[in-house]
Image (spheres, rainbow, N blue to C red):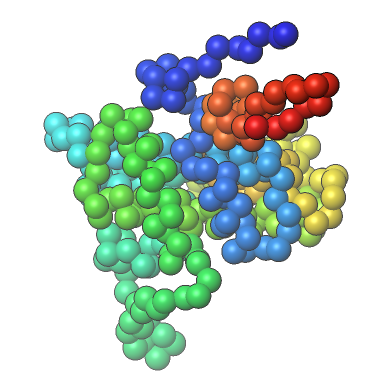
Amino acid sequence: MTAQPACPERNSPERAARTDIPPFKPSLVKAVFRDVTPMHVSRSAAWAAASVTGTVLAEIIDGARRAAAEEARRKLTPADLVSAIDRNVEVEVGTAWYEHSPTFRGLTGDVHDVEGVLVAPPRRRRSRKPSAVVGAHRFETGVKRLLSSRGVTAVPAMVRDLDGIASAFLTDLARDAAMVVREGGVKRFGSVTLVTPGEPGTPPPLDGSLQALSVRSGASRTIGKDDVLAATTMQLFGDVRQQALARAREATPNTRFGTDDPGCGGGRPLRRTRTTRGATLGT
């Protein structure tokens, strides 16, 4: 009988120290994708999307943590979130949430129509189908897990904003992944180029790993891991993109502790059997 590898206990420090376990469950990721597209989402794609979203939120929390540390605080506030985004434009994601949050409403400026009349912010309405805004509360557990892993806490308003940003970002990621499948590859990459005013800018060259994502292969009705990676190149840029891609490439269901790793207490439980007079019976 082959010995099973030793696995950390569910609440052990070794397991808590693991940084490659996405804070958002693949089942939540698939639920968001179902809100966007009827396409099938593979397990590896769900793990990759969970990893990308977790990486982005971790970068935002780290930036807010540094802002709070300057005032000797460990509890994050919405002001720390704004400071983190101001200091690092690479983490300005999930912008669909901004107009719904009091934190950002005063920063995005007033909107006027063609006649100069002030346009009121959209009213919140209940929806039968979850959206990036209505379904944002589903991310609270993962956000709190991320905050704890970074050694900080946050006021309820900050948690709400992180929930919304995660939900809006993952929704955008799902839309772009579905578009990659429909169009047979990625047609645009997110990028930022610093240029001198008055001079034309040239886009930075794509490295080989990004060029490989420009053309896809695979089932035409299934969103795979490479499609999520391609969508990530459209949503992110700079160092955050590289970190998210690297961690997502390593995200595979078979190397995780939890429901997708049968060797570590996850997956479908094994049935005990007993043998009676040559017949095997399940118990």
**Which residue is outermost to the bottom?**
115
For the residue pair 55 and 278, the one nearer the viewer reads as 278
- Residue 221 visible in the shown view: yes
Q: Quadrant of the N terminus?
A: top right
Quadrant that contains the C terminus: top right
Residue at 63% x, 44% y: name it: 46
Q: Is residue 150 shown left or right of residue 231?
A: left
What is the quadrant of residue 232 in the picture? Answer: top right
Question: Which residue appears at 37% of the width and 37% of the height?
Answer: 145
Residue 26 sits in which quadrant?
Answer: top right
User: Residue 11, position in %: x, y?
Assistant: 39, 24
- The extreme front residue here reads 277
Look at the image and tell me whether residue 237 can be seen.
Answer: no
Q: Nearer the viewer, residue 116 or 161?
A: 161
Q: Nearer the viewer, residue 109 or 131?
A: 131
Residue 51: x and y in percent read 55, 37
Instruction: Identify which residue is drawn at 53% across, 16% down.
Output: 7
Question: Where's residue 15, x and y in %?
Answer: 44, 21
| Residue at (73% x, 54% y) in the render | 40
Q: Is residue 168 left or right of residue 16?
A: right
Residue 191 x %, y %:
58, 46
